[in-house]
């Protein structure tokens, strides 16, 4: 497939996704975008069959996602929505976290799910977690999602059809206040907020997401 990666930077995860998709025989190009990037023009120039966003901090315009399947790599478990997902994982002391590959629509992180993967959260900082466990999970989930798109037969899972037990994540506050990250310089959320509770344990969120219909299970490892 002709795949266009759109990202805010050609960071470690974007590089890994680029290399893995190329190794799997796809024709991959990259467009680095900012809020000022005329993304519709860039998409027309590349004429992709699929768009993947491994790391994006700007919204994809309706003009783009309504005409192309755009896969968003969200660094949080199924049901997690909002910014600073890894900050929350570290702040909450989560034992496990995950990555969800979902289709862009008009709701942030609320699109249909093409694939997801869980991973352990060792006692490391956010950056180390992102480069290792999260990156491994993300690559596996992206490859599974792309294969499903390429098949032409797979129907992604609408989040609204999932039971609460199948959504271990939850929406997070969208305010400027975020939780404490690896640097310890951010303001932690108010403990009384319902959004500060850790992900609800469920059969769907452990070593895999096997209880969630149509969502892949991806084993992850820690890079030495």
Image: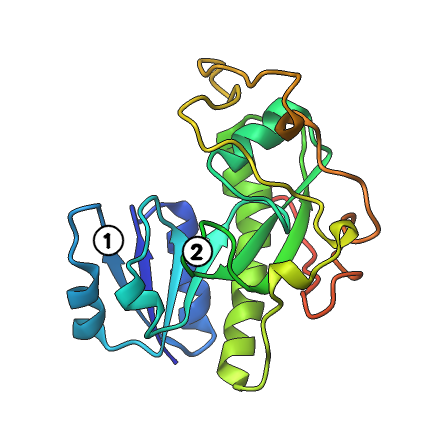
Q: Is residue 193 left or right of residue 178?
A: right
The answer to whether residue 84 of the structure is visible from this angle is: yes
Question: Which of the pair 12/47 is nearer the observer?
Answer: 47
Q: Tell me the residue that label 2 is attached to.
A: 16
Q: Is residue 1 above or below residue 3?
A: below
User: Is the C terminus in the top left, top right, bottom left or bottom right quadrant?
Assistant: top right
Q: Secondary structure at mark 1?
A: strand
Toward the right, the furthest residue is 203
Q: Is residue 208 above or below residue 86?
A: below
Foreground tag (1 vs 2): 1
Residue contact between numbered discs 1 and 2, judged by CB atoms under 8 Å: no
Place of residue 94 in the rendered image (x, y in percent of width and height, measured from the top left): 70, 31
Q: Which mark is residue 115?
A: none
Q: Quadrant of residue 6?
A: bottom left
> What label does residue 32 carry, if any?
1
Q: Would you identify the image quadrant in which residue 161 lies?
A: bottom right
Describe the element under mark 2 as helix, strand or loop.
Answer: helix
Q: Residue at x 24, y 77 (%)?
A: 47
- Seen in the image, is 139 located left or right of residue 218? left
Q: Position of residue 181 (x, y in %)?
A: 51, 22
The answer to whether residue 223 is visible is: no
Q: Residue at x 39, y 81 (%)?
A: 1
* Front-lying residue, 195 or 88: 195
Q: Position of residue 175 (x, y in %)?
A: 43, 27
Residue at left 30%, top 76%? 48
At horizontal 52% and vertical 22% (from top left) the residue drawn is 179
Residue 224 drawn above or below residue 215: above
Pinpoint residue 38: horizontal percent, then vertical percent. 15, 58
Q: CA distance from mark 1 to mark 2?
A: 15 Å
């Amino acid at each position: 497939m002709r795949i266009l990666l759109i990202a805010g930077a050609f960071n470690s995860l974007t590089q890994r996704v680029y290399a893995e998709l190329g190794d799997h025989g796809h024709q991959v190009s990259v467009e680095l975008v900012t809020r000022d990037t005329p993304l519709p023009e860039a998409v027309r120039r590349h004429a992709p069959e699929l768009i993947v966003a491994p790391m994006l901090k700007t919204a994809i315009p309706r003009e783009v996602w309504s005409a192309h399947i755009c896969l968003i790599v969200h660094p949080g478990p199924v049901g997690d929505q909002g910014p600073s997902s890894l900050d929350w994982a570290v702040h909450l002391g989560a034992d496990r976290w995950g990555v969800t590959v979902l289709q862009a629509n008009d709701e942030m992180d609320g699109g249909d799910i093409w694939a997801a993967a869980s991973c352990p959260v060792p006692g490391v900082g956010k950056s180390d977690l992102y480069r290792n466990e999260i990156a491994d999970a993300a690559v596996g989930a992206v490859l599974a999602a792309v294969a499903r798109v390429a098949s032409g037969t797979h129907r992604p899972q609408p989040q609204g059809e999932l039971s609460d037990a199948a959504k271990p994540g939850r929406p997070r506050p969208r305010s400027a206040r975020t939780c404490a990250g690896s640097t310890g310089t951010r303001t932690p959320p108010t403990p009384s907020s319902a959004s500060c509770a850790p992900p609800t344990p469920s059969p769907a969120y452990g070593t895999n997401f096997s209880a969630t219909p149509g969502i892949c299970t991806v084993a992850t490892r820690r890079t030495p």
